[in-house]
Image (tube, rainbow, N blue to C red):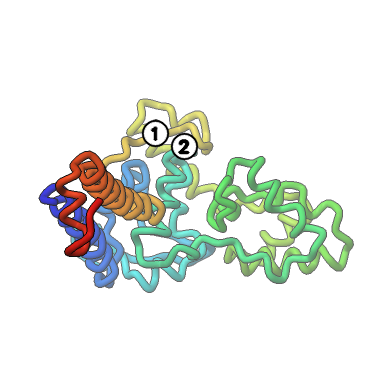
């Protein structure tokens, strides 16, 4: 019984700690760069980069140490992780997890809304994103990749106009870039920004930034000190309840076994006057 009590207490304390950490993160009005994954932090905060989220839009720092941004500003950006796009795929997915799970922007904050996109492109885009490496099919991965991935090719002239309108709003890009994306496929913007990031990668990682902007410029970061994701929390809960259920079952089984093997104990359970 003591073992069962200890496990129940441990599970309770673990779940309370998880809930407390989540509440602390929700209560803050600022995005803290110290909570960012390693590679994301290097390019989005460690070198003083201001968070940009599209054409002419950015979030200035809210502190003198250049470590925090306004949550409202950050969450309203279409591509706040733009500065982390230079990280490799593993580090990029860590950044996406951080964005949807640790910033307070919400688990659906990076969803790519296909509403308004004509069927000729909508039917193509999800699978094309997977093939391009955006396995989460997130908005930022699509917008920062800057390519329609051929999904506009089967659209009519009128449908292409609809694609351009959708693209302009989905990624917060100029009408000119949106039209370019429909006509040529690529809608990459502001080459000077990427050149700056490549130069920084060159300084930090011994010249590897000269290879250009792609997902293998930066080595994968170590996964340390990151908050649990929802499915990891669920696994903890299930594990706790499973452990308690197993212990209860074992105790009951042991008790029944003792009764069956001990005639005197069985007799004591019978109503007065009855015999085995």
In this picture, is 73 found above or below 185?
Answer: below
**The image quarter in which residue 104 lies:** bottom left
In whole angstroms, how far apart are the C-alphas of marks 1 and 2?
A: 7 Å
Residue 134 on image: x %, y %: 58, 46
Count of numbered tags: 2
**Foreground pick, 265 / 25:** 265
The residue at the point 86 percent across, 54 percent down is 154
Q: Give the x, y percent position of residue 35.
A: 27, 53
Q: Position of residue 12 (x, y in %)?
A: 20, 59
Question: Is residue 45 toward the left or the right of residue 147 in the image?
Answer: left
Which residue was labeled with disc 1? 220
Instruction: Give SS at disc 1.
Output: loop
Q: Secondary structure at mark 2?
A: loop
Residue at label 2?
Answer: 88
Residue 263 higher or lower than 187, as above or below: above
Task: Give the residue displayed 80% in from the left and 63% down from the top.
Answer: 119
Which x, y percent locates residue 170?
A: 61, 65
Q: Mark 2 Cα within 10 Å, few/some/many (few <14, many 20+)?
A: many
136 vs 116: above or below: above
Identify the residue shown where x is 43% and y is 47%. Answer: 84
Residue visible at 34% across and 36% down in the picture: 221
- Ranked by sequence position, the earlier of labels 1 and 2 is 2
Q: Is residue 271 visible?
A: yes
Pointers 1 and 2 in contact (C-beta within 8 Å): yes
């Amino acid at each position: 019984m003591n073992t069962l009590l200890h496990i129940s207490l441990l599970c309770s304390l673990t779940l309370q700690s998880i809930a407390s950490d989540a509440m602390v993160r929700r209560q803050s009005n600022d995005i803290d760069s110290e909570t960012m994954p390693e590679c994301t932090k290097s390019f989005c905060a460690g070198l003083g980069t201001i968070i940009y989220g599209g054409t002419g839009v950015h979030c200035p720092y809210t502190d003198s140490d250049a470590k925090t941004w306004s949550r409202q500003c950050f969450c309203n950006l279409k591509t706040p992780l733009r500065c982390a796009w230079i990280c490799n795929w593993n580090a990029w997915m860590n950044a996406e997890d951080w964005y949807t799970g640790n910033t307070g922007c919400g688990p659906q904050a990076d969803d790519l809304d296909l509403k308004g996109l004509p069927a000729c492109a909508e039917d193509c885009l999800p699978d094309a994103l997977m093939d391009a490496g955006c396995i989460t099919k997130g908005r930022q991965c699509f917008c920062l990749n800057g390519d329609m991935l051929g999904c506009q090719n089967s659209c009519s002239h009128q449908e292409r106009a609809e694609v351009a309108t959708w693209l302009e709003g989905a990624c917060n890009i100029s009408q000119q870039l949106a039209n370019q994306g429909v006509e040529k496929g690529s809608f990459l913007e502001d080459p000077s920004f990427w050149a700056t990031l490549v130069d920084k990668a060159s300084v930090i990682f011994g010249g590897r930034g000269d290879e250009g902007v792609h997902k293998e410029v930066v080595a994968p970061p170590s996964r340390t000190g990151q908050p649990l994701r929802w499915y990891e929390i669920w696994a903890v809960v299930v594990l706790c309840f499973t452990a308690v259920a197993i212990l209860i079952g074992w105790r009951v089984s042991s008790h029944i076994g003792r009764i069956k093997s001990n005639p005197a104990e069985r007799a004591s359970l019978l109503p007065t006057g009855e015999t085995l």
